[in-house]
Image (cartoon, helix red, strand yellow):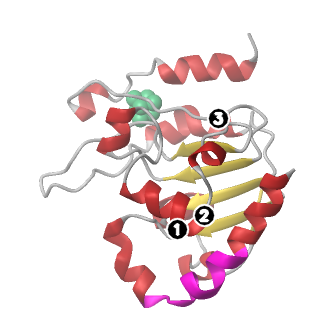
Amino acid sequence: MSEFEKIKNEILNCSFCEEKFGFTPHPIFWGQHNSKIVQISQAPSNNVHLSNKPFTDMSGRTLKYEWYKISDEEFYDTSNFYISALAHCYPGKDKNGNDKAPPKCCYEKWIKKELKLVNNEIYIIIGAKAAKMFFPNKDFEELVFRNNVLNEKLTIVLPHPSPLNKKWIKDHPKFISERIIEIRNILKEILKD
Ligand code: SF4
């Protein structure tokens, strides 16, 4: 068994956060060692926790159909996308009914190691929390509006497509009118090969 398959099996069987969550963790894993695009967001939502398939929620609809403008067939083709996050599991709700922050342990325990095993062409980092992890000292807005580099690879940073992030999108109209079009063109080039 390859190192990649070994770590994938270990992640899928991980229940490290069970006590913290108060329910059985459900690790979501999607991708293969040679996926072209590594996409890293925050953490699965409750809908994703239930469907066992990433971005099967409102955020996913915006991301796939309005921003990327690609089909489910392309998005869920693991030779195209390796879909990861700061945590593999839905962390539950806080007392205000909002999704809890992704548990920090998952990055050190799994994500950091698995990302080293993927031979991707580019990264897409989604949301301010994930951007802070990979670019701790950079301004989020600047990261979104330029092409960045991570591990010597082209890296795109996106705002979170959640409906809860509508204000950021409204306050930055050039994201929809200009930047996402540039990003879509980059994606088209990568996916056509
Ligand atoms: S979030 Fe990560 S570390 Fe925690 S149970 Fe899920 S896979 Fe394991």
Q: Amino acid at mark 3?
A: Gly
Which x, y percent locates residue 166?
Answer: 36, 76
Label 1 packing within 10 angstroms: few (<14), some (14-19), many (20+): few
The residue lying toward the viewer, choosing from 121 and 64, is: 64
- Quadrant position of the N terminus in the picture: top right
Q: Position of residue 109 (x, y in %)?
A: 53, 32
Front position among marks 3 and 2:
2
Q: Nearer the viewer, mark 1 or mark 3?
A: 1
**Residue 136 is at least partly visible in this image:** no
**Residue at the farthest right position:** 193
Going from N to C along the chain, the mark reached first, 1 or 3, is 3
Check the image and report above or below for 127 versus 100: below
Relative depth, front residue between 11 and 109: 11
Say whether residue 125 is left or right of residue 3.
left
Residue that mark 2 sits on: 69
Residue 31: numbered disc: 3
Vertical order, 1 against 115 (above or below): above
- The magenta region covers 171-182
**Quadrant of the rendered image containing residue 84:** top right
The secondary structure type at the circle numbered 1 is helix
Q: Residue 167 location in percent, x, y? A: 35, 82
Distance (Cα) linking label 1 and label 3: 22 Å
Crowdedness near tag 2: few (<14), some (14–19) or many (≥20) residues, C-alpha within 10 Å? some
**Considering the numbered disc 3 on the image, is that residue within a helix, a strand or a loop?**
loop
User: Which residue is denoted by mark 1 in the rendering?
Assistant: 66
